[in-house]
Amino acid sequence: MKKYENISGLFTAIYSISFLSIAAILNALLSFGTQILLAKNLTPNDLGVFSAALSSVVILVPLSGFGLAHFWLKAYGEEKFNSARWLKSSYLLMATTSSLAMLAIWTWSYFDISGSILQILSICIIGQAIIEILGAKYQIEGKYGYLSIISLFQNLLRFLMVCSLLICCKDLFNLTNIAFSYAISAAIIICFSSFELKRFSKNLSKSYCETVVNQDDAVKAVAIKTSRLYRKTWPFALATCFQLIYYQSDIIMIKLLHSPAEAGYYNVAFVIIAATYILPNTIFQRYLLPKVHHWSKHDAIKLRQVFRYGVQSMSIIGFIVMVGLNIFSTDLILIVFGEQYHNSIDPLNILAFAAPFTYVSYSVGVLLMTADNIKTKMFYMGLTALFNIVANLFMIPKYGANGAAITTALSAVLLLFLYFIGVKRNFNGATWGKR
């Protein structure tokens, strides 16, 4: 009987991962298609300005969401319906941090040449943060179909808005109107997600009250102080922020330290390499993360298996991706983006060398999000972000996009090395379920 249950569980896992992967591929194609439309109809200089502005907004998303999505997954994995007690304070915390994030981007806009673009795109901070929260909701509920749809929703809206702008008002296809297209997409997502989260809160709180005998205690327990939640979520928020700094700040720094056009070249390479990370992100962040939180507390042997098989499989796949990109990078860029982005070829070839290290980092890093290990992960990501910024200060002025690509590749190597140190120090024999 147990054998059949294992086989059934394996097929369920394969089905869920396949479904999420297909959706993630479609999502990447939509994002890729939007970038192609922008690249084909904007100069490298304008593309660099817009990409830098969007990256500035994305870097502030962790401040808006403040690690709530990751904390919800951890809380539910450990507490199940008892996690409902965190909901009210979660929304209060998000309202506060979102206001601070908006204030930060508007303040920065007065010192940046693309200030008006930043102001228009600022609503995307809340849109992206609430998508992550809604994604966590669907992961908790095991609704991977809905998770796939909401993941597609944002890029589908952006793609349709940009297409409509090109078809109906090509003469008005400029950075301001493109930014408005992104902002309208974010506003639609915020309205839809708010309705879904309200329904989720009601259902989860009802399930929680049904699990306790004393209903008065249940009502009291739901209202946990926001300050207590803050102490739980800030490591997740900082870890995500550090990740975005060493992953996306390159575009901003290239624009500031070299030129917007060079930032445009790097953005094209970045879009391509980011699309190749669909598989590890889907497996470890979308499908396995809620389960890993549960296994870390209740099934250490399963946790060890996930680590071992994850490292082996991601090493092989990452190597294949690296080789493939180096072989086809020239044709891919020239055919898809055009001759004007020829200077994106070398950065892409350099970024490709980071693929095996980044793939394995997904499988190793997910372990450091369990229990109290997130602070260790946050520290390692902070070191990597610091290295990335300092190295870019030297590399970008001299080598432009190529220098940023080299720094990013070295950051990937450093991060994986630190992750392995963290796993070795924080997971002993008992944790791994050795007998």
Image: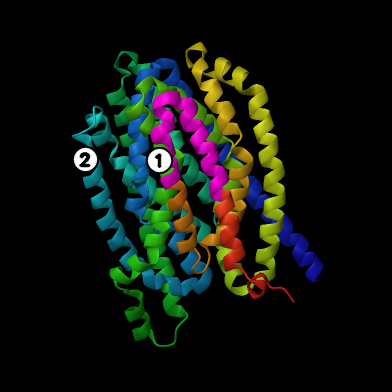
Residue at numbered disc 2:
106
Camera-side residue: 351 or 413?
413
First in sequence: mark 1 vs mark 2: 2
Which amino acid type is marked by label 1?
Answer: Val
When the figure is inspected, residue 70 is found, relative to residue 146, above or below; the finding is below
Q: Residues within 10 Å of mark 1 (few under 14, many from 20)?
A: few
Residue 139 showing in the rendered view: yes
In what quadrant of the picture does the N terminus appear? bottom right
Compare residues 129 and 246 and report the one nearer the observer.
Answer: 246
Across and down, in percent, residue 29 comes to: 54, 31
What is the chief secondary structure element of the magenta stretch?
Answer: helix
- In the rendered image of this protein, does residue 210 appear above or below residue 259? below
Q: Nearer the viewer, mark 1 or mark 2?
A: 1
Q: Quadrant of residue 309?
A: bottom right
Question: From the viewer's perspective, is residue 72 above or below residue 327?
Answer: below
Secondary structure beneath disc 2? Answer: helix
Which residue is under mark 1?
390
Q: Looking at the rendering, in which quadrant would you find the C terminus?
A: bottom right
Along the line of sight, which residue is nearer the eye, 282 or 4? 282
Q: Residue at x 54, y 56 (%)?
A: 143
* Residue 432 place in picture, x, y as percent: 66, 70
Image point (34%, 63%), residue name: 90
- Would you identify the image quadrant in which residue 207 lies? bottom left
Please provide the residue range marked out in magenta.
386-415
Q: Position of residue 205 (x, y in %)?
A: 40, 71
Relative image position of residue 93 (x, y in whole percent): 29, 61
Residue 86 magenta = no
